[in-house]
Image: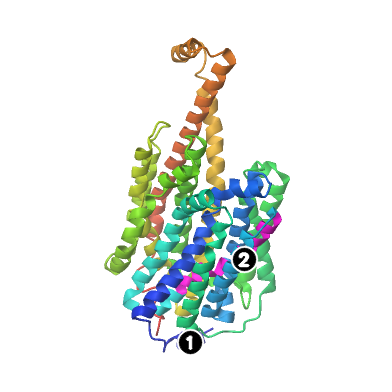
Amino acid sequence: MAATPENAAPLKPLHGTPLVLLTIAVAFSTFMEVLDMTIVNVSVPHIAGSLAVSPNEGTWAISSYSLASAIMQPLTGWIARRFGEVRTFVASVMLFVIFSMFCGMATTMPMLVVGRLLQGAGSGPMVALSLTLLLSSYPKEKQGIALAMWAMTVVVAPIFGPILGGWITDNFSWPWIFYINLPVGVLAAIITWTLLHKRETKTVKAPIDAVGLVLLVVGVGCLQFMLDNGNDHDWFASPLILTLGLIALVCLTFLVVWEIHAKHPVIDLSLFKQRNFTVGVISLSLGMFAFFGINVVFPLWLQTTLGYTATWAGLAAAPVGVLAFLLSPIVGRNMHKVDLRLLVSWAFIVFALTSYWFSTFDSAASFGTLVVPRFVMGLAIPCFFIPLNQIYLSGLPASEIASASGLSNFFRTLGSSVSTAVMVTLWQHRAISHHASLTEYVNPAQPGATQYLQQLSQLGLGASRRIAYIDQIINREGYTLAVNDIFYACAILFVLLLPVLWFARPPFGSAGGGAMGH
């Protein structure tokens, strides 16, 4: 392992056309992998319909992918050291493409779930290694731009996923959301292999840590399954969810203890001894928790409460990507001129203000009104992702970048999964609570309610129709007030995260620290 930086020393950075080609290939493969996490979301009703299962069972197509991907991400460092970073990346891209085709050809739900599991497992190391390969191929002074390009694809893909998924499903058929990966993946793999196969990293034949591997697979598997299905089973009231939660807790606790003392750990937890890595990963995970929560609940509210179609909900959510896309290269190019902690603090302040802005909307808010804060929120995205990646990678030798990137990606994914489970549950519970308190105002003692009921009876509605209509309105307002609560809570979380960040210690230097190329 110690030989890797020495081995990496003679490698000159790429320049000109090869660098542009590599950046495009790596960016597109990352885009494709992250896109596949969200592209299926809007197509679930179509998939469930064509495979003759309930929409609830259809969501297995989402959870099986994120489950396998989450397990593989922390293993990235170990796999890359064992087989070489370039080989692992190219193999990962090809496996992803092969299993994408398998998913598209699925004729039953179990077949699709198996395909998605294998697709997620194949893609696990891809995102972390794409960053590692970019950083090792860019000249030191341009590594900020490499980080910006990478962060841009990781951020923009989940936003375009639902829009692209909706458009493909509406205009073609759902298997095409998997088939489009074929040309992109094959081209990315060929370009990467052609340019980088002579720059392969030194491999180390470390024995496999079987105990750590089993604890990781079982622990993360149970945790992810619990998070994906908890809401449908009423959480810990269900013996299944309770059992899964306990198994996850026991396995993950043992995993931490085991990996700290293992001679050849499958996950390198010693990275947490680095102050900047720990602070960066905590800020990234919790920031992602709040950011992703907003992105999950917002389109859900639009579709279930305000009657938006999948495409229009996607269009309402999309403006967040405009400024993110435009500003990422600028932030990347000028990052070294500013204290990175100031940049991330600015991002958290913008996130907090826009979240608070969202918490003031009522159910009559127009499409235009909803789009403005989404657009403004885009200001914060490049200042959140790009500097945080730089902070947690600062001071690490080149040999540890793959492990660090894999581990931080794992926590980012976990933050998103926990956020989806918590925010949707919280939203539904707050809606029930608001529904109950609003119902109390519908009684003869309230002149407003009495007058409204009289107006409805003048329209010729019978007693039961009148009550049903009122209940519909209370439902809509209850869910809207609940969404306001969620946004308000996220705004508070962003403010609370501000001091955490300042525990990071400069200098933040180039990613890969001083050891990159020394």
Position in image of residue 144 (x %, y %): 34, 70
Q: Is residue 231 visible?
A: yes
**Mark closer to the observer (1, 2):** 2
Instruction: Using the image, tell me which numbered label, if any, was put on residue 416.
Output: none
Position in image of residue 129 (x %, y %): 50, 72
Residue placed most toward the observer, 247 or 228: 228
* Rendered view: 182 above or below 45: below
Q: Is residue 252 visible?
A: no
Per the image, label 2 sits on a secondary structure element best described as helix
Magenta stretch: dominant secondary structure: helix
Circle 1 is placed at which residue position? 198
Crowdedness near tag 2: few (<14), some (14–19) or many (≥20) residues, C-alpha within 10 Å = many
Q: Looking at this rendering, what residue extends furthest in the left direction?
A: 337
Circle 2 is placed at which residue position? 99
Q: Residue at x 56, y 60 (%)?
A: 178
* Rendered view: 202 above or below 267: below
**Of the residues shown, which amino acid type is indicated by label 1?**
Lys
Q: Residue at x 55, y 53 (%)?
A: 40
Does the magenta-highlighted stretch encompass residue 241? no
Q: Quadrant of the N terminus?
A: bottom right
Query: According to the image, what is the colour scheme of the structure?
Result: rainbow
Q: CA distance from mark 1 to mark 2?
A: 28 Å
Q: Quadrant of the C terminus?
A: bottom left
Position of 360 with respect to 38 (left or right) is left
Position of 255 with respect to 303 (left or right) is right
* Rendered view: 193 above or below 297: below
* Magenta-colored span: 110-132
